[in-house]
Amino acid sequence: MAGQRNNSNQLLVPQATAGLNQLKYEVAQQLGIAIPQDGYQGNMTTKDNGSIGGNITRTLVQIAEQQLAGK
């Protein structure tokens, strides 16, 4: 199974892919984590990947809360 990617997650809005990737790099930069230029994150630590994912989720929740509040 090594090297095979089995991702069953599907974006509800496929056009959001570029924005989510941009957010990933922005969050990583804020945290001082370097994502390899080729985009392969398999050699990164679980802690680093988790930190990036957690901060992305936090940012997306903040955006949604602001939109719901009418800001």
Image: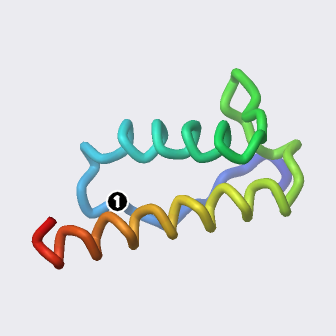
In the rendered structure, the answer to whether residue 58 lies left or right of residue 63 reads right
Amino acid type, mark 1: Leu
Crowd around label 1: few <14 · some 14–19 · many ≥20 (10 Å): few
Circle 1 is placed at which residue position?
11
Say which quarter of the image contains residue 35.
Answer: top right
37 over 63 or under it: above or below: above
In the rendered structure, the answer to whether residue 60 lies left or right of residue 35 reads left
Q: In the image as oriented, which residue stretches furthest toward the front? A: 71
State the scheme by which the image is colored: rainbow
Helix, strand or loop under label 1: loop
Q: In the image as oriented, which residue stretches furthest toward the left? A: 70
Say which quarter of the image contains residue 6.
Answer: bottom right
Quadrant where the image shows the C terminus: bottom left
Say which quarter of the image contains residue 3.
Answer: top right
Where residue 64 appears, x then y in whole percent? 28, 71
Q: In the image as oriented, which residue stretches furthest toward the top? A: 37
39 over 15 or under it: above or below: above
30 over 56 or under it: above or below: above
Q: Residue drawn at (66%, 55%), measured in percent from left and top?
A: 52
Where residue 31 appears, x then y in whole percent? 72, 47
Q: How many marks?
A: 1
43 over 11 or under it: above or below: above
Q: Foreground: 25 or 10?
A: 25
Q: Residue drawn at (55%, 39%), measured in percent from left and top?
A: 26
Q: Residue drawn at (18%, 69%), measured in percent from left and top?
A: 67
In the rendered structure, the answer to whether residue 33 lies left or right of residue 70 reads right
